Image: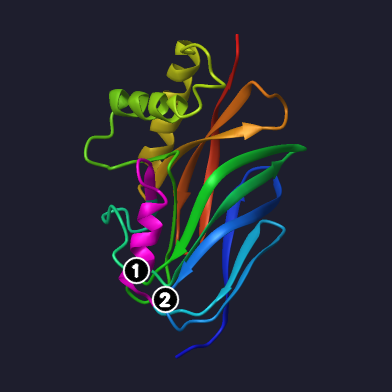
Amino acid sequence: MTTLHNNEFVFNIEGLSEISFTEKDHKITQGQPYQGVSCKGTTLTVKAGRHNSSDVAKWFLNNTKGGGVIAKTFNDEQPEALNFAVRGTLVLHIKGVAYTLDDFVVGQGHFETHNNWWIGSKQMFGVTWKEVNQQYIEGLVEDSLNVVSDIISEDPVGSIVDTVKLIFDILNKRKVGSGSIAARTSESASAVELFLFQMDNSDTNAVKTGHYKHP
C-alpha cells in the first residue's frame, strides 16, 4: 500500500523550545511516497509511506558508519529493515542556545506491534550494554569528544570524570537504547556540549552531560 503518513518523532530535552532539521538526503522503499521533513516545536515530522526494506536499512547504516545507531530495541545493535530514513543537520534550541548536530540520521522501522524509530550519526557512540561500568563509560565520553578534537584542544580529565558519574547514574535507571554525541554550540566557536540520547517508541529523551571548551 502506498499511503502517505505524517510520521512524528518527538525530542524530549529539559529546556528545549524548538528544533530545526535541514535535510541533506533521504532513502525510502521503492514505490513509496515521500514529501520531506518539517518541524514544529519539538516534533520532527517525516511525510512518507510505510513499507520496510533492507535497502533503506543499508542506506541508514552506511550513513552512520564509524559511529553508532540506537533504538528502543536495545537488544538489536542495528536495523535489518526500515520504512524510510533521512539525513541532515539537527539544531536543538535550549534556553536561548542553539546546539548543532551535523549528519544526524533518523529512520523508522517496525518492531512487534508498532513503528519504531532509530537515530544515529557517524559522530554518535552507542551503548552496547555488554559491560556498562565506569571504565566503559569513560571510554564512551572520550570517544565522543575525539570526533570534535578540532574544538577540544586538551583532555578535560576533571570534566570527563564528572560526566561519567552522571551518565552512569542515568544508564542504570533506564536501560533502553542509548548513545552519546557531541554538539556544537552557538555560545562559542570553541565549545561543545555532550548529549546522552535515550530512545523510546516515537520519541527520544536527551540529557546534557558535559560542556567542554578550549582552555
Nearer-the-camera pick, 86 or 40: 86
Q: Quadrant of residue 143?
A: top left
Q: CA–CA distance between discs 1 and 2?
A: 7 Å
Give the structural element (helix, strand or loop) at label 1. helix
Q: Residue at the spot x=30%, y=56% of the render?
A: 78
**In the structure shown, which secondary structural element does the residue marked by tag 2 occupy?**
loop
Circle 1/circle 2 CB separation < 8 Å: yes
- The residue lying toward the viewer, choosing from 134 and 44, is 44
Q: Residues within 10 Å of mark 1 (few under 14, many from 20)?
A: some
Q: Is residue 167 left or right of residue 99?
A: left
Position of residue 193 in the picture relative to residue 53 (left or right): right
Residue behind mark 1: 55
Q: How crowded is the residue under tag 2: few (<14 C-alpha within 10 Å), some, or many (20+)?
A: many
Q: Which segment did they paint magenta?
A: 52-69
- Position of 197 compared to 74: left or right? right
Q: Residue 85's spot in the image, x, y percent?
A: 47, 64
Residue farthest to the right?
96
Disc 2 target residue: 29
Residue 116 in the image: state x and y as whole percent.
42, 66
Which quadrant, please, contains the N terminus? bottom left
**At x 68% / y 53%, what residue is drawn?**
20
The kind of residue on which mark 2 rests is Thr
**What residue is shown at x 57% (from left), y 42% (from top)?**
101
Where is residue 201 shown, x and y percent of the image?
45, 63
* Residue 66 image offset from top left, x and y in percent: 35, 41
* Residue type (three-letter) at the residue carrying disc 1: Asp
Quadrant of the frame with the C terminus = top right
Let me know if residue 55 is in the magenta part: yes
Q: From what the image shows, is residue 9 above or below residue 125?
A: below
Residue 92 part of the magenta segment? no
